[in-house]
């Protein structure tokens, strides 16, 4: 088994959510890569399958030691294994934490435009979404610190969900920015839940910093959620880790994940994660190089063929955020038109809140050949849309 990021894998008719599309359609929407996962993970699955027995599983110390090893070697942070808990996914963990850490009617702060499922975790649990919108200044997103301070100071704001790095804008938060967020949160008694599921996927020279690694203030007032799912394209493995350094907060979170039955792994989760975190570094580095090259290819193509669009310069995730306001302020209509006309399926930005109605999100985690197909479809779709509007 080798790392081949050019392999054109046919995923149609495989129960893939992403590829449940018509025969002529090309899906570049949901955060799911078209790359075969790391060889070590596949081998671990095969070894487990050979046992032929798939009973109830425990989470061994080796699982948490693998998580610690990965964060120490890849991100210069070695969280204590006692701080960790296994969960069946980041999103279920977020919803559980919202229920345990905040109260019905509280505000949960986000930074729109942001991953749309955060809104579900808040609203579905009887809390209120309060956004301190990120500000787009000439294609660079930043925090409005006065606004963030004001909204954290609201007595009803008890929790913040931080997307680190940020999806969909691809922002890699600096240690200084994370420290400032942490200081404001501590001052206003706001617990920070850091969703760091995209942390491993960054361009060279733009490393992600775990929120809790910055200083003790951040560590003692935070819940960090990490997973192999995005990094290694194993979302269906249903395995993630919560890291909570503060014991009192950890006890609250722990009670929640047990009440919500989120702590029992499937038969492949433990060997898969251990293999990923102990054998997968070279694969991730190769994958990141491919993603960076794909983002550069997209940016160059749009600059030449679709100059009316603006690619937001993001150095994290394999999701590219593109400003279409010179074409339309209703990108839902634009995406629907492009899909109907060309078969290209991309995400309209309105669901992410904030200024998302001006944007589309495109997933570039695929072989360059497939990306080129998508870009030509995008060009044709946008130009046809412009002719009619």
Image (cartoon, grey):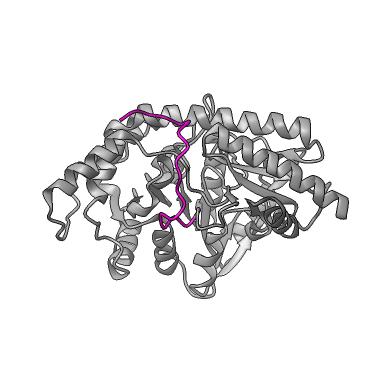
Task: Give the image location of residue 153, x and y in percent.
Answer: 61, 59
31 and 159: which one is in front? Answer: 31
Q: Is residue 154 found left or right of 338 in the rendered image?
A: left
Does residue 328 show up? yes
Secondary structure of the magenta portion, mostly? loop
Residue ID at (39%, 39%): 36
- Which portion, as a residue range, is magenta? 1-17
Does residue 217 show up? no
Depicted 347 relative to depicted 261: above or below: above
Q: Quadrant of the N terminus?
A: top left
Any magenta on residue 258?
no
Residue ID at (40%, 62%): 92
Name of the residue lying farthest toward the front: 23
Q: Is residue 278 found left or right of 154 in the rendered image?
A: left
Task: Give the image location of residue 341, x and y in percent.
Answer: 72, 54
Q: Is residue 144 found left or right of 54 in the rendered image?
A: right
How many badges with numbers are in the image?
Answer: 0
Q: Quadrant of the C terminus?
A: bottom right
Task: Give the image location of residue 73, x and y in percent.
Answer: 34, 28
72 and 54: which one is in front? Answer: 54
Residue ID at (56%, 42%): 180
Any magenta on residue 5?
yes
106 and 302: which one is in front? Answer: 302
The quarter holding residue 13 reads: bottom left
The quarter holding residue 212 reads: top left
Task: Give the image location of residue 243, x and y in percent.
Answer: 34, 49
Residue ID at (18%, 46%): 48
Depicted 109 relative to depicted 290: above or below: below
Name of the residue lying farthest toward the top: 205
């Amino acid at each position: 088994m080798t790392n081949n990021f050019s392999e054109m894998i046919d995923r149609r008719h495989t129960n893939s959510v992403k590829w449940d599309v018509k025969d002529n359609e090309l899906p570049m929407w949901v955060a799911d890569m078209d790359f075969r996962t790391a060889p070590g993970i596949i081998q671990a699955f095969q070894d487990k399958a050979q046992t032929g027995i798939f009973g109830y599983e425990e989470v061994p110390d080796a699982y948490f030691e693998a998580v610690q090893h990965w964060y120490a070697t890849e991100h210069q942070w070695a969280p204590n294994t006692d701080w960790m808990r296994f969960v069946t996914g980041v999103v279920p963990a977020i919803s559980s934490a919202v229920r345990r850490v905040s109260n019905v009617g509280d505000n949960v702060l986000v930074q729109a435009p942001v991953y749309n499922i955060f809104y579900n975790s808040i609203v579905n649990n009887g809390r209120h979404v309060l956004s301190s919108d990120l500000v787009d200044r000439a294609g660079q997103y930043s925090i409005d610190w006065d606004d963030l301070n004001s909204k954290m100071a609201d007595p009803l704001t008890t929790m913040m969900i931080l997307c680190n790095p940020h999806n969909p804008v691809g922002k890699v938060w600096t240690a200084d920015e994370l420290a400032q967020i942490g200081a404001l949160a501590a001052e206003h008694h706001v617990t920070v839940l850091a969703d760091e599921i995209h942390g491993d996927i960054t361009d060279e020279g733009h490393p992600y910093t775990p929120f809790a690694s910055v200083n003790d203030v951040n560590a003692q007032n935070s819940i960090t959620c990490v997973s192999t799912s995005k990094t290694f394209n194993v979302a269906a493995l249903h395995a993630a880790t919560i890291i909570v350094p503060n014991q009192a907060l950890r006890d609250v979170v722990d009670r929640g994940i047990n009440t919500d039955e989120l702590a029992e792994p499937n038969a492949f989760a433990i060997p898969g994660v251990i293999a990923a975190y102990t054998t997968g570094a070279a694969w991730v580095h190769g994958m990141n190089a491919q993603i960076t090259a794909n983002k550069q290819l997209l940016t160059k193509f749009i600059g030449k063929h679709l100059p009316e669009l603006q690619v937001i310069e993001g150095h994290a995730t394999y999701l590219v955020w593109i400003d279409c306001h010179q074409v339309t302020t209703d990108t839902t209509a634009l995406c629907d038109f492009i899909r109907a006309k060309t078969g290209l399926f991309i995400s309209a930005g309105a669901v992410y809140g904030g200024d998302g109605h001006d944007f589309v999100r495109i997933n570039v985690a695929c072989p360059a050949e497939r990306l080129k197909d998508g870009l030509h479809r995008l060009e044709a779709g946008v130009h046809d849309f412009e002719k009619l509007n």
